[in-house]
Every structure is written in structure tokens, then in C-alpha cells.
């Protein structure tokens, strides 16, 4: 949910968030991998069961508990954001404007660690 690859509906919703009045002060959550690359973004929603707190936002981004624990172990984390910088980065990555393959360490078998559990 709101992670790469984005669905058309998610992309359109994030574009609307980016162009919303007051977007420069929007509080959000960014899902990042162990290298700091952004894989998901959603605005914070006060009172929401999913988007009000960091831990529930992580669960909303990655609903599968086992997968979420694995990703947390390899460095994935949710961070609070303000403004649209991280949102813009995610939209650029979704369009392919940013190379998503650089700086991914190889495992012994030649696959990237993130590839084991695609976001």
C-alpha cells in the first residue's frame, strides 16, 4: 500500500497530496530501506488507525508481519517527514526518473537483498 511499484490509483492520490493546498507543511511517513532510499510515502492522518503513528504506518505499508519483521531487521524503517521532498522522490522513482538499482549490495547468490522480499 503506497509502496513501489505504485498502482495508478495510489500514484494519482499521491499527486493530489503533492498539489494540495499547504503541501509544503504536510506531515507524512516515509518508508525507507537500509540505504535510505524511499519506497513508500503516505501523509499522517490524526486519529487514523493506520496513519497516525510510526508503528501502525509501518504495518500499513507492509501488512505481512513476517515480511515486515524481516525488512526491519535489514534496515527498513518508517520516518516522519514534513513537506513534499520525500513524496516527490517517491514519485520520481515510480516514474523511473531515479535509478533504483544503484547501491544495492549483492548477496552470495548474486541477488539483491531487497529482491528477496520485493516492496
Image: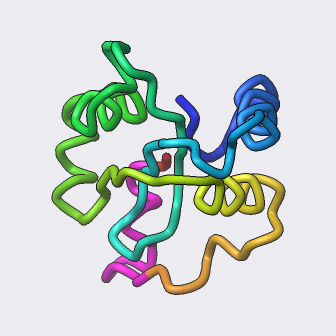
Pinpoint residue 19: horizontal percent, then vertical percent. 82, 40
User: x and y percent of residue 50 in the render?
Assistant: 36, 20
Q: Where does residue 67 sit, x and y in percent of width and height?
A: 27, 40
Left or right, 51 with respect to 4, comes to left
Which residue shows up at 77% across the image and 61% down it?
92
Q: State the scheme by which the image is colored.
A: rainbow
Q: Main secondary structure of the magenta part?
A: loop
Q: Residue at x 59, y 53 (%)?
A: 83
Residue located 61% across and 76% down the image? 101
Q: Nearer the viewer, residue 90 or 28?
A: 28
The spot of residue 26 in percent (x, y) is 57, 42
For this rendering, which residue is in front, 18 or 7? 18
Side of 11 where 76 appears, left or right:
left
State yes or no: residue 106 in magenta. yes
Question: Relative to 54, does residue 36 appear above or below in the rendering?
Answer: below
Total number of numbered labels?
0
Which residues lie in the magenta part? 105-117
The quarter holding residue 116 reads bottom left
Residue at 71 percent of width and 35 percent of height: 17
Residue 49 among those drawn in magenta = no
Is 92 situated above or below 45?
A: below
Q: Nearer the viewer, residue 17 or 2?
A: 17
Amino acid at each position: 500500500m503506497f509502496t513501489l511499484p505504485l498502482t495508478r490509483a495510489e500514484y494519482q492520490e499521491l499527486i493530489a497530496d503533492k498539489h494540495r493546498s499547504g503541501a509544503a507543511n504536510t506531515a507524512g511517513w516515509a518508508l525507507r530501506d537500509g540505504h535510505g532510499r524511499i519506497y513508500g510515502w503516505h501523509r499522517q492522518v490524526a486519529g487514523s488507525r493506520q496513519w497516525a503513528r510510526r508503528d501502525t504506518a509501518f504495518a500499513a505499508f507492509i501488512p505481512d508481519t513476517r515480511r515486515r519483521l524481516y525488512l526491519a531487521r535489514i534496515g527498513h524503517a518508517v520516518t516522519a517527514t514534513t513537506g513534499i521532498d520525500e513524496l516527490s522522490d517517491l514519485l520520481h522513482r515510480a516514474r523511473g526518473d531515479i535509478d533504483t538499482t544503484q547501491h544495492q549490495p549483492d548477496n552470495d547468490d548474486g541477488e539483491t537483498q531487497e529482491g528477496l522480499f520485493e516492496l
